[in-house]
Image: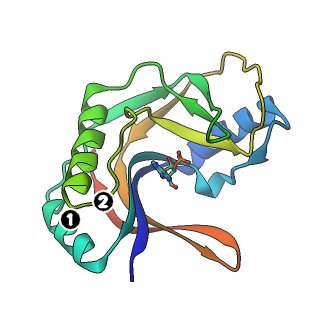
Amino acid sequence: MAERLFFAIPVGISHQMALIKHQTHLGDIGRVVPSTHFHLTLAFLGQVTHAQKQALLQRWQDLTVPELHLTLDRYLHFERAGVVCLGCSDTPIALNRLAQQLRRDAARHGLHAHRAPFRPHVTLFRNVHGAIELPEPNPVTLPLNEVQLVRSYREMGKLVYSPLMRWRNVS
Ligand code: 3AM
């Protein structure tokens, strides 16, 4: 059976608190994403078969997670998706390289082919309808300590994100 997978950077507790403050600050603009669901997606893979997963895990067994910090300093409203996120104006080159590597490998294995450029963000609200005005945010700086391969599924109607694999840097 295929699983819905994506690569993401997890958000630790202290940074979750900072992001909750952003949600409070923005108020009632949509459906609040629970803090336990905060993550920064690097590559969405889509439905992955067991054979594809095995091949990719072999490919990624030596995946290097670069040491870097990422400053989230602007609100983004993706109107088509109906989401509001905290994103960044300056994507670190090493982060972009990592996301592109994962996306390229996935596409080579017949998985999701991204057409849109990589725009790092943490989603704060879903079901945001219509045009909204967003203020300048207080920046949040996330360290990149870990990358996870995450399975997403529904259990009793509730969305569950379950990390299957973790790659850490040495810091
Ligand atoms: O909520 P975010 O954006 O942080 O970006 C989507 C989401 O993370 C991405 O995968 C993450 C977990 O669901 N995603 C979902 N469907 C997608 C699609 N069809 C997608 N990215 C590209 N195409």
Image quadrant for the N terminus? bottom left
The answer, for residue 12, to whether it is visible in the render is: yes
Residue at 42% x, 30% y is 70
Instruction: Name the disc covering residue 56, or none.
Output: 1
Residue at 33% x, 62% y is 166
Q: Residue furthest right?
A: 28
Q: Position of residue 141 (x, y in %)?
A: 49, 30
Q: Nearer the viewer, residue 106 or 74?
A: 106
Q: Nearer the viewer, residue 128 or 169?
A: 128
- Taking 63 as reference, is 18 above or below it? above
- Say what amino acid the circle numbered 1 marks: Leu
Q: Is residue 20 left or right of residue 121?
A: right
Residue at 26% x, 56% y is 106
Q: Is mark 2 within 8 Å of ligand 1?
A: no
The answer, for residue 170, to whether it is visible in the render is: no
Instruction: Name the disc covering residue 111, or none.
Output: 2
Q: Nearer the viewer, residue 141 or 129?
A: 129
